[in-house]
Amino acid sequence: MQIVSQMSALDPEVASQLAEDLPPDVFRNIISTFEEDLARLTQELAAAARAGDQEGYERAAHSLAGAAAAVGAIGLEREARIAMDHRQPEPPATVLPRLLNEAEAALQALHALIN
Amino acid sequence: MPARVLLVEDTPTQAEIAKAMLREFGHDMRHAETAGAALKIAEEWRPDAILVDLVLPDFSGMELMRRLKAQGVNAACIVLTAHGPVNTAVEAMREGATDFLLKPYAAARLRVTLENALEKRALRQALDTAQTVLGRDRFYGFIGGSPAMQAVYRTIESVAGSKATVFISGESGTGKEVAAEALHQASPRCRKAFIALNCGAIPRDLLESEIFGHVKGAFTGATENRIGAARAADGGTLFLDEIGELPAEMQVKLLRFVQTGQVTPVGGTRAEKVDVRLVCATNRDILAEVQAGRFREDLYYRLYVVPVVLPPLRARGEDVLLIARHLLAAYAREEGKAFTGFDAEAEGAISTYPWPGNVRQLQNVLRNAVVLHTGGIVTRSMFPALLLHGAPASSPAAVAAHPAPPSPIEPLVVSEKRLILAALEHTGQDVPRAAALLDVNPSTLYRKLTAWKRES
């Protein structure tokens, strides 16, 4: 049951294709890079939100959306795209917790895929 | 076949995935995280393909493609985009992208897109090369796209990089000096001097000094040191036109120069080494001159290393009209006239006339038409009678090969007129050159021509 909910954080087609296209050690390296990206970009996102730096906030959200899309983290990508769209009404305080939850779920799902 | 692929991507996860895929394909790959870094790598490394993310930290992928184009980087650009609006793709293609890829992409999709882009680029390059080799209608100073001239252009290009002596032959007015200059311009010597000397137009006594220079006091009138053409051309190209006119004693000196690469000025004692690429030309049959004993055989073999044979204008098909249009535009501009072209009859006359004096004769006829007439279009009636009444009996080369038997005795004025007309015919109606061949002042010829015109 937990595996199923973790997998729903990923687009199975993208993530599985990636795992299939690349040798296991390379795929593992990519997940590590994604993890590093995630840590850095979520920090940048939170810092920009605290500082009221809209441009920095959108830039970090854009990079996060790109990284998430690359590994098929669809839930995280969706939240990042909401964050990078300045026309949407939700403030960072509402979007960020959801985004961090999706990030956590995506990581768990990717680790499950490796294992 | 492995290609050089530059990846421009600022998000590490995406970059790592693309790099892993490219490595799997066996391509030689480099990665730039910013557009600025990509420009630098592209200029130095000259990639075959560039994968361009549209959103980059310093400036956009679109702007990057514009700058790459301006920089002359002709890699196949593939745009990587997360969204797929049609207008983004259209704009990317307009900026020179070969294709675009929607992110995320599978390895197979990247492979196919990249292979297609590389194949398209290879075809484009092959087409450009073919057009350059086969379809040129200009080459340095030459105008003309005929097969005969394409062969000349290819020979010049092939030998330009070498130091081998080039021997240019062709009838008067076919562009021997233009060919020599093209050789110089296409060679690594192009930044150094191109020195042209017409051996037929320099008095015999001065030839040695003109080529090798002299020291002060070497002979009456040598009031200063003179470096001469060979030393002036050091590092560059020395063009000796009408080499067949070189007197026997100068042939010996030229042979020594060609063998040693050393120059001793007239009156000097010290030889000096020079680095000169020698180009010679003649409108004579140089081998016949060797067989007749008028040109040294050893010098012939030293000079006749790479022959370039310039075709006569009558063998160049449509080139004559291309050249005529170019000359008309130039002369109209120079003379402040409004001529913009030829009517059909005039073009017909230009195309059918055999032009024994080649391009030089065409130049004279067109200059004459522009100077003496006004209007927007050159008509047939503006051409001299010679052109309108068809071909002369034979080309100058044929005349030289089969001279009419001269009458044993004739009045001096008749002989003189015959010689002058022959010299004019030989030089394509070029009065200064005809005068040089006859060893008289050009004004003498102009005076006689005016008098004969009055008489007739």
Image (cartoon, rainbow, N blue to C red):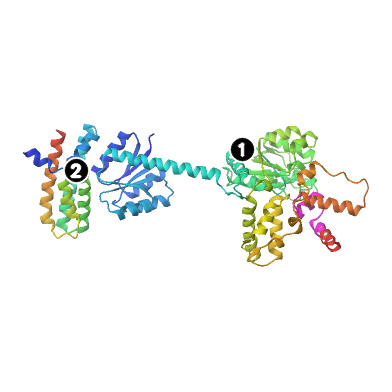
Measuring from the top left, give residue B151's x and y in whole percent.
61, 41
Quadrant housing the N terminus of chain B: top left
Q: Name the residue tied to disc 1.
A: B163
Quadrant housing the C terminus of chain B: bottom right
The kind of secondary structure element at disc 1 is: loop
Judge whether residue B47 is colored magenta. Answer: no
Q: What amino acid type should be assigned to the residue bearing mark 1?
A: Lys
Total marks drawn? 2
Measuring from the top left, give residue B66's x and y in whole percent.
38, 53
Q: Quadrant of residue A94?
A: bottom left
Q: CA distance from mark 2 to mark 1?
A: 63 Å
Q: Would residue B227 be visible to someone looking at this image? A: no
Q: What is the chain identity of the residue bearing mark 1?
A: B
Q: Main secondary structure of the magenta part?
A: helix
Is B445 left, or right, of B413 in this rendering? left
The kind of secondary structure element at disc 2 is: loop
Q: Are marks 2 and 1 in contact (CB under 8 Å)?
A: no
Determine the residue positioned at 58% across, 43% down. B187
Decide: few, some or many residues near mark 2? Use Cα within 10 Å; few <14, some 14-19, many ≥20: many
| Relative height, residue A53 to residue B174 (above, below) | below
Measuring from the top left, give residue B179's x and y in whole percent.
64, 45
Determine the residue positioned at 63% across, 50% down. B319
Measuring from the top left, give residue B106's x and y in whole percent.
26, 40
Residue at the far left: name it: A1
Query: In the rendering, which numbered label is found on residue A72?
Result: 2
Which residues are the magenta region?
B427-446
User: Closer to the camera: disc 2 or disc 1?
Assistant: 2
